[in-house]
Image: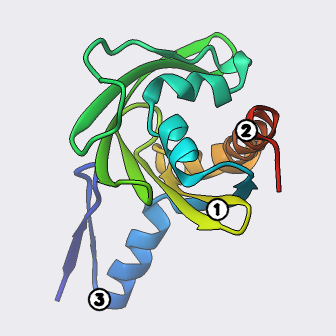
Amino acid sequence: MMYRIVNPYGYSYSCKRSIDAVEQKQTIMSKVYSIKTVQTIPVSLKEAWDFFSNPANLATITPDYMNFKIISKHHGERMYPGQLIEYKVSPLPLYRVYWMTEITQVKEEQFFIDEQRFGPYSLWHHQHHFKEVLGGVEMTDIVHYKIPFWILGDIANFLFVKKQVYQIFDYRRRAVEALFGKL
């Protein structure tokens, strides 16, 4: 008996045993990576929510070298489910890309989730959580991302993408501390 496997890019592979199909799929698919950051700031939950749920403030906490610019005209001032936000960003020098995210879920003053619809990743799922704690707000970001181009994407992640994602979140932590202070 032959087993057929089709990857997300439409290529199919055949093998004789079902376990070979699973192993084949694992070797041709790139990995999904994740990062989690937690930061506590000395502001009210309302103040934190008002700042982070306003798309215009994203540029304030994004490194300058990324040349981040919101280009959508009708995204509004507050996040809501179904909202599309379009950006231009330079993840690498001399490489400017279009990026569109959709705000898929919002629970007022608790969390919102953005997912890439078009852009440099084959998957980008970013959860933003807010929790009131003694003296301020604990913010937790959880990102799952996947890079296109199978094993080449995995190599790119190893060589520079993972480092850059961590640098962006480190910059964000420092920018948020400069704006609000830290606990």
Which of the two discs, 3 and 1, labels the residue nearer the N terminus?
3
Asked whether disc 2 touches disc 3, contact meaning CB atoms under 8 Å apart, the reply is no
Residue 36 has which mark? Answer: 1
Residue 92 position within the rendered picture, expressed as x and y whole percent measured from the top left:
66, 22
At x 22%, y 51%, the residue is: 10
Determine the image quadrant of residue 20: bottom left
Amino acid at circle 2:
Val
Residue bearing the label numbered 2: 176
Near mark 1 (Cα within 10 A), the count class, few <14, some 14-19 or many ≥20, is few
Helix or strand or loop: what does disc 2 sit on? Answer: helix
Which residue in the structure is indicated by mark 3? 18
In 3D space, how far apart are the residues under numbered discs 3 and 1 (Cα atoms)? 35 Å
Amino acid marked by disc 1: Lys
Alpha carbon separation for disc pair 1 and 2: 16 Å
Does residue 43 appear in the picture of this structure? yes
The answer to which of 176 and 8 lies nearer the viewer is 176
